Amino acid sequence: MKTKIVIIDDHQLFREGVKRILDFEPSFEVVAEGDDGEEALEIVETHKPDVVIMDINMPKVNGVEATKQLIEANPETKVIILSIHDDENYVTHALKTGARGYLLKEMDADTLIDAVKVVADGGSYLHPRVTHNLVNEFRRLATANGQASSQPLQPEIRRPLHILTRRECEVLQMLADGKSNRGIGEALFISEKTVKNHVSNILQKMNVNDRTQAVVVAIKNGWVEVK
Ligand SMILES: [Mg+2]
């Protein structure tokens, strides 16, 4: 069964670019497109997609408002927000609507594909740079509350090395730094496919659903350094 996808974006060229990337993936099928949030509800009701990719800035009804309407009508709708803003306020605002993902328009093709797969699977996905910003915010709040977030909660989980290999620890750190799979591959001189394998091993060993959760758990336990 293919993952059915709807793309809502007022910028036709961008929409076509996204569609081309997704069409290249054999397990995906772009079933419909729209150019404003105004028509999102109707398109989704007609095509019943697994994932909706939604631009934020659109002329009539913006993506945040449209996402709210979609999720009110059907709480199970899986929406990935597309935005040019990595600002934490934008992200929080967008995620409050119930969106499962938040991507920056500067993303590479792999990030887009990963995000759709993770969200279709029931997980959540944030663009690596957005994760990095949220991590910083998380740390700031933890410090403001008088607890250094890098302090391990329990001595026995002070070091991740009893469950992760050294290489996996390096990859985990880079996830917290906001690097994409490609960026990690380049930094460690390994292929993106190898990076993906490391990431899926990390998720499995840490018993989390997605890379964002892995980073949050790693920070809580002091397994990564927040730069
Ligand atoms: Mg737009």
Image: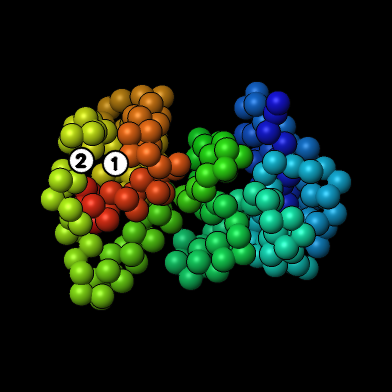
Whether pointer 1 and pointer 2 mark residues with C-beta atoms closer than 8 Å, the reply is yes
**Residue at the spot of label 2:** 160
Scheme of image coloration: rainbow
**Residue at the spot of label 1:** 172
Q: Quadrant of the N terminus?
A: top right
Left/right of residue 29 with respect to residue 88 in the rendered view: right
Where on the picture, by quarter, is residue 18? top right
| Residue 43: assigned label | none
Q: Front-most of 223 and 88?
A: 223
Number of numbered labels in the structure image: 2
Left/right of residue 206 with respect to residue 112 in the rendered view: left
The residue under label 2 is which amino acid type?
Pro
Q: Earlier in the sequence, mark 1 or mark 2?
A: 2
Q: Quadrant of the C terminus?
A: bottom left
Determine the residue positioned at 29% across, 37% down. Answer: 171
Q: Is residue 29 above or below residue 91?
A: above
| Label 2 element class | helix
| Label 1 element class | helix
Left/right of residue 60 with respect to residue 132 in the rendered view: right
The residue under label 1 is which amino acid type?
Leu
Residue 46 at x, y percent in the picture: 86, 46
Q: Is residue 106 above or below residue 192?
A: below
Left/right of residue 35 with respect to residue 92 in the rendered view: right
